[in-house]
Image: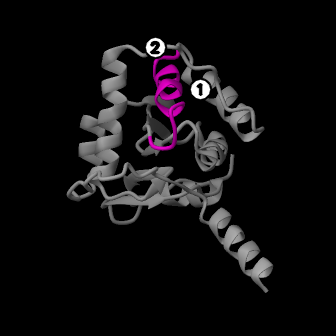
Amino acid sequence: MNRLLITSLALAALLLGACSQQDTPGAAKPSKQELSVQTVAAQAKGFTVGSMMSAHTVYVFFDPQCPHCGHLWQASTPLHNKIKFVWIPVAWINASSLPQGAALLTAANPTELMTAHEASLLAGKGGTTAPASVAPDIEQAIKANTKLLNSFGAESVPFIVTKDARTGQAVGRDGAIGTPELAALAGVDATP
């Protein structure tokens, strides 16, 4: 009975499709601010992939050590010709998160590096090799991204922010979703 319960709980955790932040003991929770696409666009530092001229922009807060973020990256790839994605690195999971985020943020070809990184991460190889040191401005940008994500009250990554295709209101969504759901969220057709 206990084995069945443990297996069921483990399966439920996998189905949620998200990684939670590692809590710092004694750290105070920030006050929650209203989710705003304009705030994310103005304050977050990320790299842009996909259709640069698209009327649809999807912002994705991600931790480079999160396998669910890797699954969302894979789900987003078929939509790169229809949607502009801005991938915003945060440092939630472990010590590799910040330097890997810095490598992705400063890459000459972020699409290529992100694809290789996520393939390595999902294969259990840890992702891209990160630099030994991170430029102070890039480190500060990733810390600011993390603070911004926390200010929205997000509890896991990936955390998607976009405008609802029907209402135009800002929406936030935790966890990885498939290509059809991502297309529907952005208000585009999922077929190639």
Q: Secondary structure at mark 1?
A: helix
Q: CA distance from mark 2 to mark 1?
A: 22 Å
Question: Which amino acid, by three-letter code, is at mark 1?
Answer: Thr
Of the 4 image quadrants, the one containing the C terminus is top right
- Identity of the residue drawn at 37% across and 48% down: 24
- Residue 139 point in image, percent of width and height: 36, 23
Task: Using the image as rendered, state which of residue 149 and residue 2 is in the foreground.
Answer: 2
Q: Decide: is 9 above or below 104.
A: below
Q: Decide: is 130 above or below 97.
A: above
Question: Which amino acid, by three-letter code, is at mark 2?
Answer: Ser
- Residue 29 point in image, percent of width and height: 27, 56
> Residue at label 1?
111
Query: Is residue 51 visible to the viewer in this orientation of the structure?
Result: no
Of the 4 image quadrants, the one containing the N terminus is bottom right
> In the drawing, does residue 144 fall left or right of residue 134?
left
Q: Secondary structure at mark 2?
A: loop
Range of the magenta residues? 92-107
**Callout in the foreground (2, 1):** 2
- Residue 64 point in image, percent of width and height: 55, 36
Q: Mark 2 or mark 1: which comes first in sequence?
A: 1
Quadrant of residue 183 within the rendered picture = bottom right
Q: Residues within 10 Å of mark 2 (few under 14, many from 20)?
A: few
In the image as oriented, which residue stretches furthest toward the bottom? Answer: 1
> Residue at label 2?
133
- Identity of the residue drawn at 51% across and 43% down: 93
> In the drawing, does residue 95 fall left or right of residue 125?
left
Task: Using the image as rendered, state which of residue 84 and residue 158 is in the foreground.
Answer: 158
